C-alpha cells in the first residue's frame, strides 16, 4: 500500500471527528470538494471504502472506524515528535491550541491573545471556546494543548496552574438597587436565572444559592451571561455573574450590580494541560505570562 500522506490522514481524522464533509473542510481550512478528493484518494490507496455516503449523512464503515482509531494514534505520535523538537527551542514557538470556557473567553481572550503574541512573537495561537467537559475531552484526545477553566478539575493526568481568583456579583433589576443585599437563604427563594447545563459557572452559582440543601427556583436557563443580564433588566429575576463580565454585560442595559455578603462566592481560574505533553516547560511559561496578564488587568 503506497501513496498515503499525512495530509490525507489529518483530513480523514477531521472527517471522523465532525461526521460531516462541510464541517471537516471548515476545520481544515480547505474547500469541501478538495477534502472529498483527498478522502477518495485515501480510499483508493487502501482499496476499500472508509465512509458511507448517503445524502447529507456521513458514516464511517467498519474499516473506517478502525482506521480512524489508528489514525488518531499516528497523528498524536507525529505531533509529539514535533513538540519534542519545539521544546528544545526554549521559548514557546509554533502552534498553540488553547481552549477557554465561555464565561471567561469574551472578557479575557482578547487580552490573552494580545499579550502572548507580544511576549512570544513566534507563537501561532489557535483559541477555541467550549464548556469545561468538552475542553477536557479535547485535551485528552490531543486536540488541544492547554485549556483555561475553573479549578480544580481534579484530573490525575493534568497539570493545574492557578491564574487568578474572582468574586461573583449579584445582578438584579435597577428598581431593587436600594434594597438590602439578600442573604444566601433569601437568594435561594428568589427567581434565579442560570446558565444551561454543562457550564461550570452554573454549578458554582447553584452551590452558593442553596445553603440549606434546597434547590433555588430557576425560572430560565440561558446559553450566555449576556442573555441572563438582559432578562434581569426586564424584571424576570436575578442572576450571578463573575466580576470580569460586569463592564461588558452591563454597558447596554440598566441593572443594579452589587457585591454579595461575606463569605462572598468566588472561583479560581487556571490553566491545565497534559502531564505527558512534551511542551510542559513552554506551557509553564505561558501560564506565568497569563498570570501576569490577569494581574495587570486587576481581575
Image: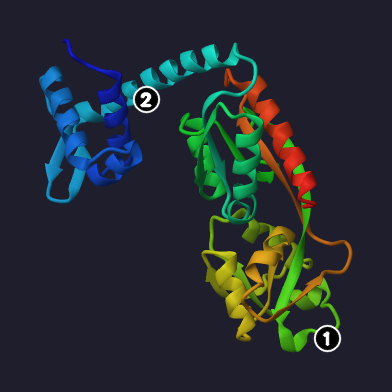
Which residue is disc 2 drawn over?
72
Taking 257 as reference, is 21 left or right? left
- Residue 147, position as x, y percentages in the image: 59, 39
For numbered disc 2, what is the local secondary structure? helix
Structural crowding at the residue carrying mark 1, measured as other residues with C-alpha within 10 Å and reported as few (<14), some (14–19) or many (≥20):
few
Taking 16 as reference, is 194 left or right? right
- Residue 34, position as x, y percentages in the image: 19, 35
- Residue 57, position as x, y percentages in the image: 19, 48
Q: Is residue 276 above or below residue 139?
A: above
Query: Cα distance, mark 1 to mark 2?
Result: 57 Å
Structural crowding at the residue carrying mark 2, measured as other residues with C-alpha within 10 Å and reported as few (<14), some (14–19) or many (≥20):
many
The image quadrant of residue 45 is top left
Q: Earlier in the sequence, mark 1 or mark 2?
A: 2
The image quadrant of residue 46 is top left
Q: Residue at 67%, 81% (x, y): give it.
A: 254
* Residue with the most extreme bottom position: 175
Which residue is disc 1 drawn over?
179
Amino acid at each position: 500500500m503506497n501513496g498515503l500522506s499525512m495530509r490525507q490522514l489529518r483530513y480523514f481524522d477531521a472527517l471522523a471527528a465532525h461526521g460531516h464533509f462541510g464541517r471537516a473542510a471548515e476545520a481544515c481550512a480547505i474547500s469541501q470538494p478538495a477534502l472529498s478528493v483527498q478522502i477518495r484518494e485515501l480510499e483508493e490507496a487502501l482499496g476499500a471504502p472508509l465512509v458511507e455516503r448517503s445524502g447529507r449523512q456521513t458514516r464511517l464503515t467498519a474499516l473506517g472506524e478502525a482506521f480512524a482509531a489508528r489514525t488518531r494514534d499516528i497523528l498524536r505520535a507525529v505531533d509529539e515528535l514535533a513538540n519534542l523538537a519545539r521544546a528544545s527551542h526554549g521559548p514557546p514557538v509554533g502552534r498553540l491550541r488553547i481552549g477557554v470556557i465561555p464565561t471567561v473567553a469574551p472578557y479575557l481572550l482578547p487580552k490573552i491573545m494580545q499579550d502572548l503574541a507580544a511576549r512570544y512573537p513566534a507563537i501561532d495561537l489557535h483559541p477555541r471556546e467550549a464548556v469545561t467537559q468538552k475542553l477536557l475531552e479535547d485535551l485528552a484526545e490531543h486536540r488541544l494543548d492547554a485549556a483555561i477553566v475553573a479549578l480544580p478539575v481534579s484530573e490525575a493526568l493534568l497539570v493545574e496552574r492557578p491564574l487568578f481568583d474572582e468574586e461573583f456579583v449579584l445582578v438584579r433589576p435597577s428598581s431593587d438597587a436600594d434594597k438590602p443585599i439578600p442573604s444566601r437563604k433569601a437568594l435561594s427563594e428568589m427567581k434565579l436565572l442560570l446558565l444551561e447545563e454543562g457550564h461550570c459557572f452554573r454549578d458554582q452559582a447553584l452551590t452558593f444559592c442553596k445553603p440549606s440543601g434546597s434547590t433555588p427556583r430557576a425560572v430560565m436557563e440561558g446559553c450566555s451571561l449576556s442573555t441572563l443580564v438582559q432578562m434581569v433588566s426586564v424584571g424576570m429575576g436575578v442572576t450571578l455573574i463573575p466580576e470580569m463580565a460586569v463592564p461588558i454585560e452591563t454597558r447596554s442595559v440598566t441593572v443594579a450590580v452589587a457585591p454579595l455578603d461575606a463569605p462572598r462566592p468566588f472561583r479560581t481560574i487556571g490553566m491545565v494541560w497534559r502531564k505527558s505533553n512534551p511542551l510542559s516547560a513552554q506551557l509553564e511559561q505561558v501560564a506565568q505570562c497569563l498570570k501576569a496578564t490577569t494581574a495587570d488587568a486587576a481581575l
